[in-house]
Amino acid sequence: QVQLVESGGDSVQAGGSLRLSCVNSGYTSSRDCMGWFRQAPGKQRERVAAIYTGTGNTFSADSVKGRFTISQDNAKSTLYLQMNGLKPEDTAMYFCAAARSAGTWGVCASSWSAGPPAFVTWGQGTQVTVST
């Protein structure tokens, strides 16, 4: 059973950096599809980035390209989100999640396109607040 626990959220000033971590304490495979999502108050949960662990291929939302980087450490069963150049509009609760199935990069790409409904296991979230 997959269990995800996020950490690393904090309050920072605009332009600052944070690194979020997500530890998977349950079952893992070499071909998982893992993602980061965020949800601001009054808004829908949205995609941030995803990674297919079989090859390390990544996907990113246009709003974070060039600023956020998703990565993995398979030995530690940990997913990371490095966030640089933070903006006030990045303020949200950030969640990591595992997709329903991966198997191939193409399946992970489809899960990324489908967004939150394709991801079945979620962590409890970690709050990121960016002030001006």
Image (spheres, rainbow, N blue to C red):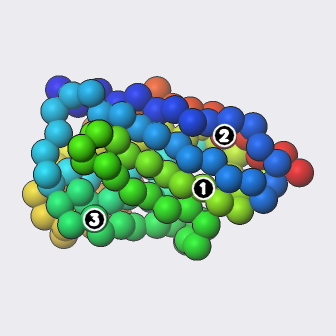
Q: Secondary structure at mark 2?
A: strand
Of the two numbered discs 2 and 1 on the same chain, state the one appearing first in sequence: 1
Q: CA distance from mark 3 to mark 2?
A: 25 Å
Q: Distance from label 3 to label 1 (Cα)?
A: 18 Å
Kind of residue indicated by mark 3: Gly
The image quadrant that residue 51 belongs to is: bottom left
Q: Examine the rendering and report whether any part of residue 53 can be seen.
A: yes
**For residue 128, which numbered disc appears in the image?**
2
User: In front here: 41 or 105?
Assistant: 105
Helix, strand or loop at label 3? It is: loop
Mark 3 neighbour density, 10 Å: few (under 14) some (14–19) many (20 or more): some
Sequence-earlier tag: 3 or 2 = 3
- Disc ID at residue 56: 3
Do the CB atoms of the residues marked 3 and 1 lie less than 8 Å apart?
no
Identify the mark at residue 83; answer none if there is no mark: 1
Residue 126: where, in percent of width, then height? 56, 32
Residue 99 picture location, percent across and down: 26, 47
